[in-house]
Amino acid sequence: MFVDFFNELLNGRLIGLKCLDCGTVTCPPKSTCDNCRGRNLERVELSGYGRVVSYTVTYVAPMGYEKEVPYVVALVELDEGPWIVGRLDVDVEKAERENLIGRRVRVYGKEFQGEMFYPMEKRVVPMFEMV
Amino acid sequence: MVVMGVGQTEFGSHPDKSLPELFAQAFFEAFDSSNIELNEIEAIYLGNFVGEITDGSANLGGFVADEIGLSGVQAMRYESACCSSAVAFKEAYLAVKHGIYDCVLVGGVEKLKSAGTSIGTRALATALDGVYEVNTGLTFPGVFALVARLYSETYGISLEELRECMAHVSIKNHRFGAKNPKAQFYNKLGNLKVEDVLNSKMICSPLTLLDCCPMTDGASAVIVASEEFAKERIDEPIYVRGVGQSSAGSLFRQKREVVKALPRRKSSEMAYKMAGMSPKDIDVAFVHDCFTIAEIIALEAMGFFEYGEGARATAEGLTDLNGEIAVNVDGGLIGKGHPVGATGTAQIYSAVKLLRNELDFVKIDAENVMTDTLGGDFGTLVNVILSVHRR
């Protein structure tokens, strides 16, 4: 499921699961509905738009990510309801200077260098572009 | 169930000791104060988070058993990130409570400082969602930085004010840690000012180095037993009155509720109910202050303050000695150190020592003490209530 999610993200599509029982959209995909726990789920494409709910500029990175610092990790609330984690495509100084919470963003996928523990050869990160 | 003897190594740097060797140090202190024979220990419940990564060593149960002379007993390793030895403690509680064992050893060991910051940070990140969080470069300071901003937005406290409130957690816990001879920062950082915390190195904004607990090597051990077994052997049994545990999924699945730490509310309510107590009955709390904001959130979820009031309560001194609830008077994870898999039973160590009035550096007339241990981004929560009174 997660491999499909990231491959589709690289193709410009944000994939989730819509519950045919309660209507809730779960994203990223999960084996059960995030609301009613049901398994009657249908694969859907989301709009890819949402708002920043929190973010942090990371200066100290884990092994395998050191070359990427500083970077901005953000939590985004998608228009369809789910929250996802990704990176905010923004200048670090701007992120430190301004409060970006509430800013509207569009999601796209970007491939980064893989690392030894990650269970996919390529490491795809949801990126949030401010619109 | 009661706690008999307790032990803890000095927290800090132990590159010259293997994981079993380090654990043995904590065990000997616990064993020597329990007045039992070695062959009376029926099982070992050991917490360890990332021995594979830091020391290339897993399957620690047997190696630890053999190291301390107990080869042959049932020995289990428990992994629940920072909650590992607290989960081990809960599992031991179930076994003793239900009469499976009369006397067992619980503890934990970890060597994160010796592993270095880069490997240590990656090792800690294995406690994140393995496909949807870790890939972004999110770290644990990052998780709590995200939570800090959410706290600020949710409760309408400006980030500037919140950072000052958080600084008071660091100041307080370092003040206690500097007095604790077993703390990583013993005799260090005991007189911090708000500006020191705000101006230290930025790790994940808005969290600076002094908002974070350190990487730590260390071990802790406690001997627990049935009341019947303990009463003929020790004079001051500490009673385990309440135990609670709960779980949650990834940070992003918890959404806005993440600032309420709902698994912790559930876990602490289980512990209160079992103990027949409420937050008002607790004299001292040892809570999971892996980051300054984490202590604030813990105190709210455990019911010591209303949601949204923990930050200002901290700045007003209500979590200090002579406040409403004395919190982390051993230095907490920030001042004492955080050898991840050993932290849960290290909190039990401090709680038991305090209840027996054996902590030389802090004297409080406490009858009921509560511990709070968190694994991951609220993925695993354990709360324990310990008391000098049987009920």
Image (cartoon, coloured by chain):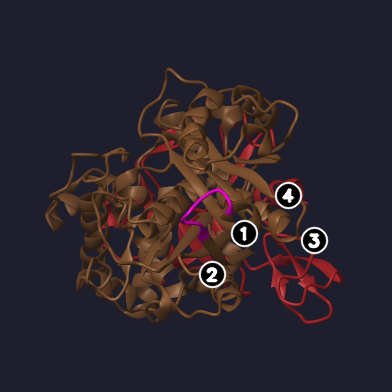
Chain colours: A red, B brown
What element does badge 3 sit on? loop
C-alpha span from label 2 to label 1: 9 Å
Q: Are marks 3 and 2 in contact (CB under 8 Å)?
A: no
Instruction: Report whether residue B250 is seen.
Output: no
Chain letter for mark 2: B
Q: Is residue B278 left or right of residue B320?
A: right
Vertical side of B151 occupied by B188: above or below:
above
* For discs 1 and 3, the disc positioned in front in the rendered view: 1
Chain letter for mark 3: A
Q: Which residues are magenta?
A: B232-238
Instruction: Report whether residue B54 is seen.
Output: yes
What element does badge 1 sit on? helix
Residue B204, image x and y in percent? 35, 49
Type of residue at label 2? Arg
Question: Does the stretch in magenta take in B234?
Answer: yes
Q: Nearer the viewer, residue A115 or B233?
A: B233
Chain letter for mark 4: B
Q: Which residue is mark 3?
A: A31
Q: Quadrant of the C terminus of chain A?
A: bottom left
* For discs 3 and 2, the disc positioned in front in the rendered view: 2
Q: Are marks 2 and 1 in contact (CB under 8 Å)?
A: yes
Q: Nearer the viewer, residue B200 or B278?
A: B278
Q: Residues within 10 Å of mark 2 (few under 14, many from 20)?
A: some
Which residue sits at x=39%, y=52%? B353
Type of residue at label 4? Tyr
Type of residue at label 3? Ser
Q: Which residue is mark 2?
A: B390
Type of residue at label 1? Glu
Residue A16, image x and y in percent? 72, 64
Q: Which residue is mark 1?
A: B227
Label 2 vs 4, first from the N-terminus:
4
Which label number is shown at residue B101? 4
